[in-house]
Image (cartoon, coloured by chain):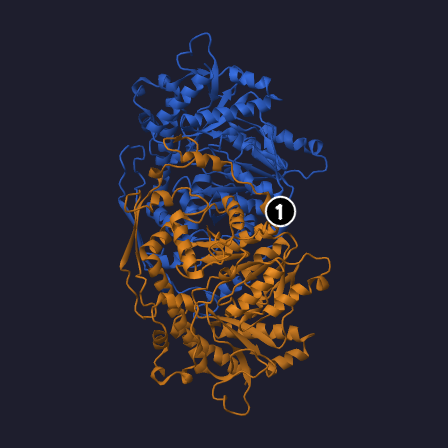
Chain colours: A blue, B orange
Amino acid sequence: MDSATTRKAIDLSHHLNELSRSRVASPLKDIIKYMKEPGIISLAGGLPHPSLFPFGEMNTKVYAPAVDLCSSEEPSWPIELFIPKNASPSHKNTLSAALQYGSSYGSVSLSSFIREFTSRVMAPAYSDFEILLHSGNTDAWNKVVNILCEYGDYILVEECTYPSAQALWAPMGCRGVPISIDKDGLIPESLESTLKNWEHTHPGVKRPHLLYSVPVGHNPTGATLSVERKKAIYKICVDFDIIICEDDPYYFLQFPPYVLPYQRKPQNAGAGSSDITSEIMAYDRQAYIESLIPTFLSLDVQGRVIRLDTFSKTLGPGNRLGYFVCNPLFAERLLRATEVTTQAPSGLSQALVEELLTTWGQEGYLRWLMGLRDSYTSRRNWMCDIIAENFDLLPSPLNIVDDVVAVQKGHGSTKDVVPFFSFSFPKGGMFLWIRILLVSNATYQNMKTTSSSNAIATARWAEAFWTDLIKEKILLTPGSYYTPIIGFNERMAQEPDVVFFRLAFSFETREMMQTGIERMANVFNRWWS
Amino acid sequence: MDSATTRKAIDLSHHLNELSRSRVASPLKDIIKYMKEPGIISLAGGLPHPSLFPFGEMNTKVYAPAVDLCSSEEPSWPIELFIPKNASPSHKNTLSAALQYGSSYGSVSLSSFIREFTSRVMAPAYSDFEILLHSGNTDAWNKVVNILCEYGDYILVEECTYPSAQALWAPMGCRGVPISIDKDGLIPESLESTLKNWEHTHPGVKRPHLLYSVPVGHNPTGATLSVERKKAIYKICVDFDIIICEDDPYYFLQFPPYVLPYQRKPQNAGAGSSDITSEIMAYDRQAYIESLIPTFLSLDVQGRVIRLDTFSKTLGPGNRLGYFVCNPLFAERLLRATEVTTQAPSGLSQALVEELLTTWGQEGYLRWLMGLRDSYTSRRNWMCDIIAENFDLLPSPLNIVDDVVAVQKGHGSTKDVVPFFSFSFPKGGMFLWIRILLVSNATYQNMKTTSSSNAIATARWAEAFWTDLIKEKILLTPGSYYTPIIGFNERMAQEPDVVFFRLAFSFETREMMQTGIERMANVFNRWWS
């Protein structure tokens, strides 16, 4: 029976680079083995005695998992987490341990909580997957590249990709291979044709063997891959022997579809978004789990997915704490890399997160994630509602892949409708991605006559428009930041006639969003007047 | 006037490797600059709103800085550190900030506390030194190697060197160049002759440009470099354009000289070591600072020292928090490397350490370090006293560099005295390093007749003896773990006829040390009977 409970990861050791293959286990491992022998006195380990750590005990007030995060009032912190200095029957998680040197595996009890959670929520498709704590997804990606990539390797990336991710590998001599995306994320056919034609387009060059993808609430485009696309991509990766690095910080922030205010059912009209979410969400944990699009890990029958999970978006980025889920061979090599670099995530972060999660329990943590999902759904709705208040939104014409086109307010039903930008309603994450359509913009037409190419005119327009937005005191992130690096000092050519900006709905209050998008609308109206 | 207050670091950019020279600043830096403009509304940053962090407020009980760490009673925690969720006039250090994405520089106020402390205690010899937080010295060393070393580089190391440090660079294709050491640490003449003869011994090979050294309480040998040696080494490094990586976790654990029980003044005889330390130490902070041997940083008029400082040995390793002190160019390159790897140390660790240090103040932190110094002095004394109780200690003959030779108890004044091992009384750190003298050991003589070389006989003897120690339930760290890696799968040849072990006095109680060293003495007595 080759089921998920008996299936094992296949041997993928040929993907390891020379650096990683050369790493050896520390000789101190022998020491640690003997330290555990009953009755042994160890003068071997160079550990400070815990009585010399100045921290005595720690009390931290935290939310109940069912807290209403959509409320405008400051929630209370009814639960107090207590971490004592030393262990007792009721407290295994102590400051003496948290402040001591720890295993690079990280806390065993935290890992085991995570394993149970991962098994339930993601149901990995093979049995010998491992959990390894890391210091946040940025460092985790660093470690992945450092075990898999050689100098000069090509890495498969989405056509818009996270700047810090490529800032890591570009100086290492690697290059991105951009794969086309649309409003639903990575396009499987583009991945397949890139790989099929590789020897033709890159004769004599080693084929890429690593795909980096943010599959849910993609940064920057906000796109979320459907399970059908994931299956198609996974199959291609099997066919072409590609390792998938699934960087998935927004996985638990998957939203129900956005409904425009004027299309909402009567009982919701004008009632604000919190009513919508409360209507949609019954706090049924199993329903929540089933509502989540399966991960690449869940489809991974071979162990070729390295999943990067993080508490950054769920419990706070400052914890610098997350975990790999991957096959045992890669986990062991990542552990070796951890031993000589970060050693382990902060023991304080581990202890506090462990105390929180074990106090909340599996059910509590799921409830917390549902509440977060609701909160970000509200925020997504705020931003979309506010855009709908400041622009007229029209269904996209066939040549535009996005959900809607935004035009000047009050012009949606007139004949001289001029599109400003198109966008899609985010189904997950923190970002909304606007595509400004320049063809009808007079300034752009002028710039084209004085630029050597349309691409240069587009870049000039983007810079000038961004600067003007800042003058109006509204800051967006330029889409050009996300252009893949495809060679030494060389970025992918940017599409002419369109300019992208990323808007985050994660941080500002509704009032600030309102003011900010009004300012943005003013600038649009002025630039098209 | 070229004084320390006006002198600037010289240009050492030619030491940077290609990886580091290729790193560019994140484009997001522009965004961060604009975010600070008054009145601006930012939809640019992908930060979660702090109301979505489940942690409300934190209370941590801590020691007073003047706590008696040598007391056998559990000290109390009279000070309560309070970290609120949100800022107020009395609290700048908040959980909202600690749990948020932070700058890779780390907390500005923590860095500024450290800068003041470093200026006072170490008085760097140039003015534009920078402080950059890191995630512990292991990760810091990883970052140093990753900005300075190319594949195939030779790195200058002590003849016994820290295993995790070389486990980092060996798989990167680097090789160690062992420099001779004695009981006082690195020998300047050995460093000089290695560099002078480099072209002769390594024709056509790039000369090493990086020295890795643990100058105080060396791991594993316990040796502490005198200021005279440091000056001589620094001068050689200037002459040969070497960067010094000063890995100095034990700097604040520098002890007064050890006095054998029978040589102590009458009032101390049999009174235990705490009396000695209380006699020696008046809690005069300036005297403490002056008692510390100046660092390489203090001698560094050019900015060629990268100092790795850590809170691991002073506030607890689990914090995973320390800091670089180095020239601005290297600090900037280390910052670029931090941005794409660890991003920043744990915000919780930063916040808690900042709250502790600012509550204690500069004077309090110095007092804490003095108390720690006393505590480790007591521990050093315990271990040396216990060895003196279980062996007879004789002055070393001229051919042995150590302070004393240990022989079988009761045989110190007999004619048939047989040396077991020699050692020196540690002047700092956590370790005591014994050199077992095999020439008079019958088992060793037998092994020599059945081994192809004396070195192989020595290794066989070490393995058998270590195994026997473990059978007696006493665990030491084999000296062979610290042998430098000098080529691919090649370690420095080990000295024949001597075997080394490292004993840590940092962790076990006095009673456990007593029992452990009694067991060790039994094994010695048996192996020489």
Residue at left 37%, top 84%?
B265
Residue A467 is at least partly visible in this image: yes
Q: Chain of mark 1?
A: B
- Choose between B443 and A512: the one closer to the eye: A512
**Count of numbered marks:** 1
Farthest front residue in view: B1
- Residue at image point 31% right, 32% down: A70
Image coordinates for residue A469, horizontal then vertical, percent? 44, 25
Crowding near the residue tagged with mark 1, few <14, some 14–19, many ≥20 C-alpha atoms within 10 Å:
some
In the image, residue B164 sits, relative to residue B464, either above or below, namely above
| Residue B38, placed above or below residue A120 | above
Q: Choose top left, top right, bottom left or bottom right for residue A90.
A: bottom left
Circle 1: residue type: Glu
Location of residue A197 with respect to B412 vertically, above or below: above
User: Which part of the image, by quadrant, shows the N terminus of chain A?
Assistant: top right
- Kindly give the residue lying farthest to the top in the view shown: A415
Residue B158 at what x, y percent from top left? 58, 65
Q: Position of residue A209 (x, y in %)?
A: 62, 40
Q: From the viewer's perspective, is B521 left or right of B459?
A: left
**Residue A33, position in %: x, y?**
50, 63
Given residues B178 and B1, the one toward you in this image is B1
| Residue A26 appearing in the image | no
**A276 lies above or below B408:** above
Mark 1 falls on what kind of element? helix
Which image quarter holds the C terminus of chain A? Answer: top left
The residue beneath circle 1 is B18
Q: Nearer the viewer, residue B139 or B479?
A: B139
